[in-house]
Image (cartoon, coloured by chain):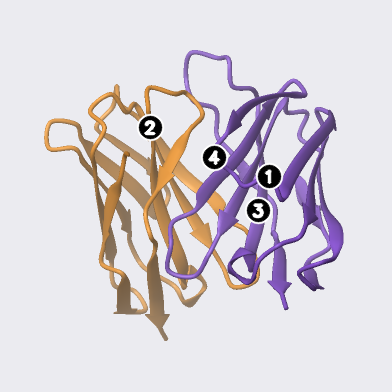
Chain colours: A orange, B purple
Amino acid sequence: GENVEQHPSTLSVQEGDSAVIKCTYSDSASNYFPWYKQELGKGPQLIIDIRSNVGEKKDQRIAVTLNKTAKHFSLHITETQPEDSAVYFCAFSSGGSNYKLTFGKGTLLTVNP
Amino acid sequence: ETGVTQTPRHLVMGMTNKKSLKCEQHLGHNAMYWYKQSAKKPLELMFVYNFKEQTENNSVPSRFSPECPNSSHLFLHLHTLQPEDSALYLCASSQETWQDSNQPQHFGDGTRLSIL
């Protein structure tokens, strides 16, 4: 089946630094790539998504880049704050479906004050 | 108020019990999903409903039985569960599954299920 490799599994940064999480996917037909943030005791929250017709998307301190040729996409968080601490999941649309998502295993981000 | 509400938040049950998980969405969406989230494993899609019709059953054991009476409500009926079924069960919704492009999925906070 489809799979996605997400790295790193844990990431610790100092407040104000940048954080980058990378995912590599397997389905060349994928055209939708969302990122979710999950805080302790909460469900995943969509923070940004990108479609295959663009290479980069930004929303304030968060950006996602997509390289369809290499089949990888990355989440970039700048000027990190302690409230950014959470588990981040990448996902991609799989199986030629427009609703089936394959998720990565997650990255635990810790922002130290 | 969150757009997707799940109850109960926590559930402990024995292997012979029967219980149900409930999900309600207030986003005007027409597609609803059940996912299973286990420790150190990716989210696993279980079921998908679009306009009350089941469109996906991801080889889920029959001890899990979904029900979607309308586009706003989704249930997961549980019976004769196994210890390995202990997990966080997440509900999500999206606009619908028929559109040409993926519609964002919005998740509830889940039900933490423990099987004794």
For the residues bearing labels 3 and 4, Cβ distance under 8 angstroms: no
Neighbour tally class for label 4: few under 14, some 14-19, many 20 plus, Cα within 10 Å: few
Q: Is residue B83 above or below residue B36?
A: below
Q: Chain of mark 3?
A: B
Tell me what residue is drawn at x 37 percent, y 22 percent. Answer: A96
**Amino acid type indicated by mark 2:** Ser
Above or below, B20 relative to A58: below
Which residue is the site of mark 1?
A: B62
- Choose between A100 and A39: the one closer to the eye: A100
Residues at marks 3 and 4 on the same chain: yes
2 and 4 marks in contact (CB < 8 Å): no
Residue at the spot x=70%, y=52% of the render? B108
Which residue is the site of mark 4?
B59
Q: CA distance from mark 3 to mark 4?
A: 17 Å
The residue lying at 58 percent from left, 15 percent from top is B98
Q: Is the Cβ of the residue at disc 3 closer than 8 Å to that at disc 1?
A: no
Mark 2 element type = loop
Q: Which residue is mark 2?
A: A94
Q: Are marks 2 and 4 on the same chain?
A: no
Image quarter of residue A10: bottom left
Q: Amino acid at mark 4?
A: Ser
Marks 2 and 3, how far apart at CA? 19 Å
Task: Report whether mark 2 lies on the same chain as mark 1.
Answer: no
Q: For the point 34% across and 74% down, which residue is it?
A: A16
Around disc 1, counting alpha carbons within 10 Å, would you say few (fewer than 14), some (14 to 19), or many (20 or more)?
few
Do tags 2 and 3 sit on the same chain? Answer: no
Q: Are marks 4 and 1 in contact (CB under 8 Å)?
A: no
Who is closer to the viewer here, B64 or A36? B64
Residue B90: mark in rendering: 3
